Image: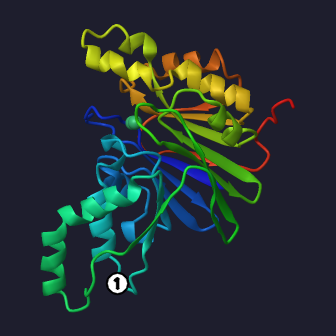
Amino acid sequence: MIEVTLLGTGSPIPDPRRAGPSTLVRAGGQTLLVDCGRGVQQRMAAAGVGAAGLTALLLTHLHSDHIADLGDLLITRWVTTFTEQVPLTIIGPPGTAEVVDLTLKAFDRDIGYRIAHHADLTAPPAVEVHERTDGVVWDRDGVRILVAPTDHRPVAPTIAFRVEHHGASAVLAGDTVPCDSLDALAAGAGALVHTAIRRDLIESLPQQRFRDICDYHSSVEQAAATAARAGVGILVLTHYVPAIAPGTEDDWRALAASVFPRQIELGDDLHRVEVHPGVCVRPAG
Ligand SMILES: [Zn+2]
Ligand SMILES: [Zn+2]
């Protein structure tokens, strides 16, 4: 079984009830964090996971809302690890190593203070960054992770992840418009976690800058169509733009259900979905 927890279902616009984009995936005793938006560690604490307990960090892309709390995560992991400091594996698109490096540079003074103060902290936070756009990026103790490119242009490159464990699988699409490479990665998956916007609501906003986001995001219906084409068992919507107004969850669900006839999950931060083997519907051909 793979357990997916929506840690943050928000977007770049601060929301009192929603943290920034981030999703926790637990499989085979491994704890994978996908993106690390604003407030991620408060939601991790609520889900019973500390920064020191992460197996790996997976980044779909380098937009600010998806990496807002990267520095906090790296520093917190470092100061709350009381055993040997094992490098944190970070898998992301090209550019990730530079962003991680510059983030650690921004905390250079903090890192210096702590090394000077604590005798058992002798080196800066350790990371091991892998920049990938496709293929198998992880195969350890029964958990396999594959990557494929997505289309979030002009933000590029961007990637989606597929986590597999004992016949169960979950795909984390990140921000993207529909594309063949995501369809292929998601084919036959147990669950597809997809970011979504309400095009019908955003297109009527007066500010062009808000309307611009329709260019490179999937609408609810487009995310659902991707799920339908790929024959996944469960569509999990997250990263709601605009934030789902209380009492309107069924409107979002109905838009997705008009295209995708199977299980649809959406909700608030900490919404949890279990993905069991065999829930997918294999696409024809
Ligand atoms: Zn983005
Ligand atoms: Zn985003």
Q: Look at mark 1 in the image and give the residue it sits on.
A: 82
Seen at 42% across and 19% down, the residue is: 214
- Tell me which residue sits at (38%, 25%) in the image: 241
Q: Is residue 149 visible?
A: yes
Q: Is residue 188 left or right of residue 263?
A: right
In the image: residue 69, left or right of residue 187: left
**Spot occupied by residue 200 in the image (x, y as percentages of width and height):** 44, 10
Give the x, y percent position of residue 191.
65, 41
**Is 7 rendered above or below residue 153?**
below
Please name the amino acid that badge 1 sits on. Answer: Phe
Residue 19 visible in the current orientation:
no
Q: Which element carries disc 1, helix, strand or loop?
A: loop
Q: Which one is nearer the viewer's eye here, 192 or 148?
A: 148
Q: Position of residue 71 (x, y in %)?
A: 27, 60
Nearest to the observer: residue 154 or residue 77:
154
Name the residue at 61% across, 29% down: 179
Residue 44 location (% of width, % of height): 39, 57
Work out which quarter of the rendered image holds the C terminus and state it. top right
Q: Residue at x 31, y 54 (%)?
A: 42
Report the front residue among 79 and 161. 161
Q: Nearer the viewer, residue 51 or 218?
A: 218
Q: Quadrant of residue 190?
A: top right
**Figure check: 188 above or below 222:** below
Residue extending furthest toward the right: 285
